[in-house]
Image: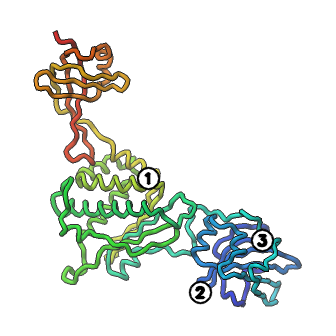
Amino acid sequence: MRLLPQHTQLGKLELIEVYEYYDTPCLFSCRNVSGQIFIAILFEQEKRVEKWLYASMSQRRFENIRAGLIDIRNAFLNSEDGFVYQVIINPDDNPDRVEIIWCENLIDDWLPMPNEFIEFGNEPLPILEVKDAPRTAMQIQREVLNLTFQFPTPNPTEAPVAFLGRILESVQSVFNALGQAIESTPTPTGIIPRSITEKTQLTVLGTYAGSFGIELATLPEKIENNNTNYLVNSVISEFFELVNMSINPEDNAYILRQKLWTLKTRVASGYRDFLVNLYKSETNLRFNWGSPNQEHRDLIELHLSSIKKTLEIINMAEDEIVKESEIVGKLIGLNIRTKRYEILSIEDNKKYSGRIIDEAISRVETATLSEVYFSTIREVKEISPTLPEGKLKYQLIALRPHM
């Protein structure tokens, strides 16, 4: 017995997915050559004659049914067209038959119970063509970057508005910062020259399903530039190099941090913000880069676990000892539990505060507030890719009474 009807007004059908199977498929989706989508359910079978209900639907409704947002019963009872097809598949060479049944005339026993759902989670729709960045790049002769997200939401083909704003802004910020790092002397703050941002500016071509995707492209190039945006090509290459290092961050920890130090603070901070936005939204991400230069293309998948580990590596700071000095000062703050201190210098009225090193705790815990002490202070610089000049910290390493 064939599964799909032949030579009917439904057209030439092809199977999309099977959702329930009992000896044979009994609930599935299909579409015809013209793109019309159907959900089909077997409601009667006798003497090798099968009777099915077919509900035609838009792609958006199919996405919602498949994501478990609309139950199967409702898919038929409330068909968008107000009717469904009864499909009778006959054995052997007997012609199949299709009849229209208005939704209000459907018999209750033909349909599933209420609150029975199809649940495919975050698996992408197989019938949807995911945008191919290299193909689009060749068509429009511009650099194209496709970002495909997988959200832990009831419908993975939709995206939170606030997230989209943040992620687009952070991608553009990284591109601008990379452009400055490549073309001129990078600065940690201030306005990036327009001569750079005009070249690194991205535009949204559109969105696409198959999870949720955003199609980005560079601006069209002027004729006098020979249709080649050398800067943005270098920017995308650097961006993909950072993302590649983030796939296995533990193996690439040292070179990732060295890379960010080389590119300077603004790039490191921007890339961190980009990853933070992904991590907060709990989404995996697939990057697809296409270029008119067919040698420049890439496809990368970045998973949530790698994003988390990369953030830990970027945020990791190292202490570089600058100097140690002894001061005479009044102890004005002390917390042994948090290992924090605060001392006011008698000589210049400068206030020192920070962490008490573990080795000094036993000598400091008996100290008295408002008393004057000889204090040995270690000045260290916290070094991180996201700190422009490093951050000075003052560790208390010794404390003894002032006689």
In this figure, which residue is indicated by the disc labeled 1? 279
Q: How many numbered markers are drawn?
A: 3
Which of the marked residues, 1 or 2, is nearer the chain's N terminus? 2
Q: Is residue 19 above or below residue 47?
A: above
Label 3, label 1: how far apart the Cα atoms are: 42 Å
Q: Which residue is mark 2?
A: 34
Residue 151 marker: none
Q: Amino acid at mark 3?
A: Leu
Q: CA distance from mark 2 to mark 3?
A: 27 Å
Residue for badge 3:
111
The residue located at (89%, 79%) in the rendering is 47
Tell me what residue is drawn at x 33 percent, y 47 percent. Answer: 314
Whether residue 158 is visible, yes or no, is yes
Q: Is residue 202 above or below residue 360?
A: below
Q: Secondary structure at mark 1?
A: helix
Secondary structure at numbered mark 3: loop
Image quadrant occupied by the C terminus: top left
Label 2 residue SS: loop
Q: Position of residue 332 (x, y in %)?
A: 24, 22
**Who is closer to the viewer here, 105 or 269?**
105
